[in-house]
Amino acid sequence: MLRWAFGFVVLALIAAVLGFGGIAGGAVTIAKWLFVGFLCLAAVTVVANALSTS
């Protein structure tokens, strides 16, 4: 999921350089949501791991 977020950030940067503001904004929004999703899943994994090992 983090790889997808990074890909959308790169897409947004390329679109911004080429002058496609709408596409860049959409790609940044998607990248933000994917990154937040990744952070939530990572936090759940860390907590679940901590609870299962104790």
Image (spheres, grey):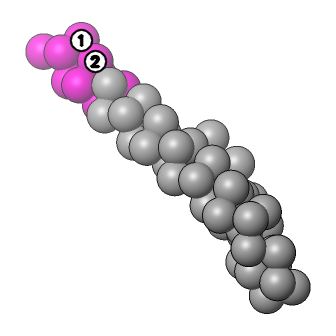
Decide if residue 36 is in sight here. Answer: yes
Q: Residue at x 56, y 43 (%)?
A: 34
Label number found at residue 48: 2
Name the quadrant containing residue 27: bottom right
Name the side, left or right, on which 22 lies relative to 33.
right
Q: Is residue 31 visible?
A: no
The residue drawn where x is 43% and y is 43% is 36
In the image shown, does 8 or 45 lie closer to the viewer? 8
How far across and how far down the image is residue 48, in percent?
A: 28, 18
Of 8 and 43, nearer the camera is 8
Compare residues 26 and 4 and report the one nearer the observer. 26
Q: Quadrant of residue 40?
A: top left
Name, please, the residue furthest toward the front.
22
Q: Secondary structure at mark 1?
A: helix
Q: Answer with left or right where residue 45 lies relative to residue 20.
A: left
Relative to 45, say whether 53 is above or below: above
Q: Residues within 10 Å of mark 1 (few under 14, many from 20)?
A: few
Which amino acid is tagged 1?
Ser
User: Looking at the rendering, which quadrant does residue 39 occupy?
Assistant: top left
Residue ID at (65%, 64%): 25
Residue 8 location in percent, x, y? 71, 58
> Label 2 near label 1: C-beta < 8 Å?
yes
Dominant secondary-structure state across the stretch colored magenta = helix
Q: Residue at coordinates 63% horizontally, 48% vertically from top-left?
A: 30
In the displayed structure, 48 sits above or below 12; it is above
The total number of labels drawn is 2
What's drawn in magenta, residue-wise?
Answer: 45-54
Label 1 to label 2, Cα distance in Å? Answer: 6 Å
Q: Position of residue 28 (x, y in %)?
A: 61, 61
Position of the N terminus by quadrant: top right
- Label 1, on which residue? 52
